[in-house]
Image (cartoon, coloured by chain):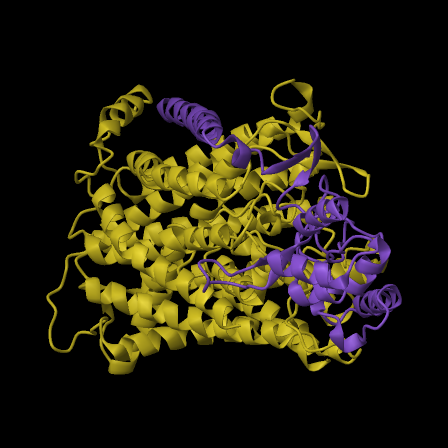
Chain colours: A yellow, B purple
Amino acid sequence: MTTELLGIILIFLVSLGLAWPLGKYINRVFTDQPTFLDFLHSLEEKLLRFAGVNPSYTMDWKQNAKALLGLNLVFFLFAFLFLLIQGSHPFWNPVQLGNWEPTLAFNTAVSFVTNTNLQHYSGETGASYFTQLIVFCWLQFVSAGTGIAACALIFQGLKNDKSSQLGNFYKLFLKSCTRILLPLAIVVSGILIWGGTPVTFEGLQEVTTLEGEKVQVATGPVAPMVAIKQLGTNGGGFFGPNSTHPFENPNYLTNVVENISILLIPMALVFSFGFFLQRKKLALLFMGVMTFLFLAFVSISVVEEYKGNPLLTELGLAPSPNLEGKELRFGSMASSFWGISTTSTSNGSVNSMHDSHSPLSGGIFLLDMMINAIYGGVGVGFINFFVYVIVAVFIAGQMIGRTPDFLGKKIEASEIKIASLVILLHPFLILAGTALASYSLSLDPDLGWLKNPSYHGFSEILYENTSAASNNGSGFEGLGDNTPFWNLLTGIIMLLGRFFPIIGPLALVGSLSFKKSIPQSSGSLKPESLAFGVVLLAVILIVTALAFFPALALGPLADYFSI
Amino acid sequence: MNSIRTYLILTLVSLVFFGLIYPLSIWGIGRLMPDKANGNPIYHDDQLVGFAQVGQAFSSANYFWGRPSAVNYDASATGGSNYGTTNPDQIRQVKERITALLKANPGVSVRDIPGELVTASGSGLDPHISVAAARIQIRRVASARNLEPKLLEELVDDHTLQPLAGIFGPGDLVNVLALNLALDQLTLTN
């Protein structure tokens, strides 16, 4: 037990410790300061110019939003097409897998473009090496790069004084991929291979077991995809059961490295904010609020899973942690810690089956995705958090009876409207999707979607919708989700849940950016103060609780109290 | 028109770079440590008998058994059970597993059975069991192989895995495949 606890403390402290220097480095990348990868500079410039982009040209929020949406639309079209014709060409398809069913191809293409990686297929039986690398691995880079670039535009807008220029999306996108994601992915891949994660193109290999049976073992170019799936908060695994699979995550060392990779960039971007705006204290306050929630959630999950399943001790077994759906080499604590990490950061990779976690632990995963801003997905996590900050500033302003301002910019009606709409969209998508699915199932109980009966079955539906809306991608995999209904429903939810929460805040910041900074007086709200931190924490919890408590009560809470 | 050109070029270049050149370069790094990059295969007289970290199904009395698997250790279509903790089907399965274990291992009582021997892992390929889970099987394996139980106790002790660097993560685990390979070796030499 002690060593398991030390293991997760190690993961947390190393992540935090590495996030600080990485945050500093990311700030250098955003602000075009020299870095050790400057030899790429002329290549990047040439590519951008060849593509018709002047790298030193800056754009306002609308031009940047158009660039982001247009580029992502083309990503989607390519991915969709490649999936539809997977079986019609001979490239990199040793097991000869066929074409994808159109709704599944739509869902999967959306899923990878939106950095969600909800997987309604199973990697080893559905995706050729061509698909895994040319489509998925590629999108895992560029969708993460899109998020990081959007975050950089937000930073610039907050820094500006009477200027509408936020920067150049194309350049920020490219540099996020080549300067931030790529070097980290190479290092992490190297460590994973060293730990025993395969990278081969051998296809299925026939093993003769000690008892004389013939078994087919799926291998493949696993390591490069696992590295970027973790670093880019994508989460889409090479194999069906993701990082529970001994090839994706062979031992405790690789587990430590992968879990750090999940947390690293989301944490670092919070520090980057501090360096970028020279507001280190404010960044630390944000980090404090996020970390408070993170550690509270970790504690609940760790305790619940360690206590184990009381229904099993009733059978006469000695008390044991809840090991259903878990791997012994990680143990229950590292499984809980990973679960909170992956739901905090909208990563969505798993190292244990979330469906089989105890009701409260599963409920905390849901809550974590409902907040969707504790560190958050690369780039977008900070953007979501920023929206909560705007609402908190507004409420705090009301409490002290002054026009609210944030970093010297007045927050007025139009900004509050955007922030409120973005905040309300998330519960709307989740609850409307859950209601629609529950209603369909009540009309036709023979649909057979649910592996688990009763309250836990409802949790499976709620989890799927929450995971799609928060662009997380993990699942209560007992849900039979590869049907046209689920493919289309979650596909649409993922699209709306990805792009509105990027475009809305861009518009908001575009409007702040153009305003003149007002001098700070003794009566201004001090966002660095502990008091503001408490208000911010309260806003996050109250907004989430008001929107989601009824749904959580029907699912995980009812499940818990029924034991 | 101009932007469409931009989108297409950035898409194609990033696709070739991150979908092709990146994974192939990593594959190149993997060739520097071919054994690891192939997933640590284990060969016996040129025949592939397993991968060090991938569990196998064991059901005969003369081998140590691993954990239950929702996919019966099918390494071409892996996965967990996805049972919720309150699912009556899971409780029923656990009961059946307890009965089977008690029948196969005389002298063992319910309280001696560690949790992992009656629950399915996440991947369906978990290669490990705890030392306690190996110990309760010693009598069965020893009598099936006509070996001294003491020899097997030593074997299990030799194969006990420690936490990472001695202090991080779970310890007192045994890799079932490694243990059974060593068991075959031991039987040959005795």
Residue ID at (56%, 62%): A335
Residue ID at (55%, 71%): A301
Residue placed most toward the observer, B121 or A63: B121
Residue placed most toward the observer, A83 or B119: B119
Which corner quadrant of the image does residue A56 belong to? top left
| Outermost residue toward the front in this view | B190
Which corner quadrant of the image does residue A361 belong to? bottom right
- Which quadrant does the C terminus of chain A fall into? bottom right
> In the image, residue B152 lies at what x, y percent?
72, 59
Residue ID at (35%, 71%): A289
**Whether residue A340 is situated above or below residue A129 in the rendered picture:** below
> Across the whole image, how many numbered discs are drawn on residues?
0
Q: Horizontally, is A321 left or right of A271 in the view?
A: right
Answer whether residue A349 is visible to the viewer in this image.
yes
**Whether residue B40 is situated above or below residue B9 in the rendered picture:** below
**Whether residue A543 is situated above or below residue A466 in the rendered picture:** below
Residue placed most toward the observer, A251 or A349: A251
Residue placed most toward the observer, A245 or A233: A245
Answer whether residue A510 is visible to the viewer in this image.
no
> In the image, residue A191 lies at what x, y percent?
43, 43
Q: Horizontally, is A536 left or right of B93 in the view?
A: left
Q: Horizontally, is B123 left or right of A546 in the view?
A: right
> In the image, residue B54 lies at what x, y percent?
66, 45
**Whether residue A488 is situated above or below residue A67 in the rendered picture:** below
> In the image, residue A174 lies at what x, y percent?
33, 34
Q: Horizontally, is B110 left or right of A197 in the view?
A: right
